[in-house]
Image (cartoon, coloured by chain):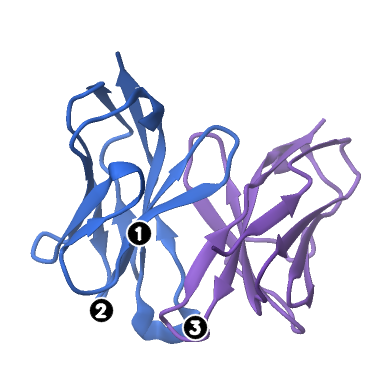
Chain colours: A blue, B purple
Amino acid sequence: AQSVAQPEDQVNVAEGNPLTVKCTYSVSGNPYLFWYVQYPNRGLQFLLKYITGDNLVKGSYGFEAEFNKSQTSFHLKKPSALVSDSALYFCAVRDPNTGTASKLTFGTGTRLQVTL
Amino acid sequence: GAVVSQHPSRVICKSGTSVKIECRSLDFQATTMFWYRQFPKKSLMLMATSNEGSKATYEQGVEKDKFLINHASLTLSTLTVTSAHPEDSSFYICSARVGTSGKYEQYFGPGTRLTVT
C-alpha cells in the first residue's frame, strides 16, 4: 500500500525567508509525486509534479521540490516566502505501475503561515 | 488547461433531505472522475471512482446507498447525498481523469461546501 507523511501540521516562516514543507512517501514502485495548494474554501491547485528525470522539479509561483529516492522524500521549497503563500499544502503520491487502478494518496496537509 | 467545475459551490440543506452535487469537465471528456471528502483541517479522503456508463467503485467504508454517484455522460458526474444528516457536512471535491494509462493526469474541481442543519 502506498502512503504519504507530512510530519508538520504547520510551518511558520517570515516573509522573505526560505521555506521548506516536508513530505516522505512509501510506494512499491517508482512513484509519481505531486504537490497541491489549497486556499480556504477552495479546491486543490496543482503546484508541481515529479514523474521522471531531473530530481529538482520547478513549479508554479516559484515553488520547487526535490525528489530524493534514497530518503523517499519530496520536500517542497521556495527561496523567498510571500505572505500570499499562506495556505494548506498537500503532498500526494501515486504508483503508475498499477495502471488505471492507480489512485492518488494524499498526506495530511501542512499549513504554511507566512508573516511579515 | 483542463477545467473542472462543481455546482453548487456551497449548499445548506435540512436533515433528512437529499442534495445533488454536479461535477463537470468543461473542455475535455472524462471517462473517470473521482469524488473526495475533506473534513475540517484534514486530508482528502477518496470516496469513490465514477466511471462513465457503469457503476461507481466505492472505497471501503463508504456507503453506496448514502452517496449515490451517477456518471451519465463523458463530461458530467453527480454525487447525491441521500437523507443527509449533520455528520455529512463536509467539503466535497471532485476530480476528473485524463488519459487511460497509469500516466494519467488528474484535474480538481473547486469543491462544494455542504452544511446539513
Q: Earlier in the sequence, mark 3 or mark 1?
A: 1
Q: Earlier in the sequence, mark 2 or mark 3?
A: 2
Query: Disc 2 designates what residue?
Result: A29
Q: CA distance from mark 2 to mark 3?
A: 15 Å
Residue A103 visible within the image: yes
User: In screen coordinates, is B10 left or right of B39?
Assistant: right
Kindly indicate the quadrant of the structure image that contains residue B98: bottom right
- Residue A100 badge: 3
Kindly indicate the quadrant of the structure image that contains residue A111: top left
Q: Is residue B72 above or below residue B25?
A: below
**Mark 1 residue crowding within 10 angstroms, few (<14) / some (14–19) / many (20+):** many
Q: Position of residue A86 (x, y in %)?
A: 39, 28
- Residue B110 badge: none
Query: Disc 1 designates what residue?
Result: A34
Determine whether the residue tagged by mark 2 lies in a helix, strand or loop: loop
The chain under label 1 reads: A
User: In screen coordinates, is B13 left or right of B36?
Assistant: right
Q: Residue furthest left?
A: A70
The chain under label 3 reads: A
What amino acid is found at the position of numbered circle 2 in the picture?
Gly
Residue that appears at 24% across and 76% down: A30
Q: CA distance from mark 1 to mark 2?
A: 16 Å
User: In screen coordinates, is A98 left or right of A75?
Assistant: right
Kindly indicate the quadrant of the structure image that contains residue B72: bottom right
Foreground: B112 or B85?
B112
Q: Is residue A16 above or below residue A71?
A: above
Q: CA distance from mark 3 to mark 1?
A: 17 Å
| Pair 3/1: label in front | 1
Assign the N terminus of chain B to one quadrant of the image.
Answer: bottom right
**Mark 3 residue crowding within 10 angstroms, few (<14) / some (14–19) / many (20+):** some
Circles 3 and 1 on the same chain = yes
The chain under label 2 reads: A
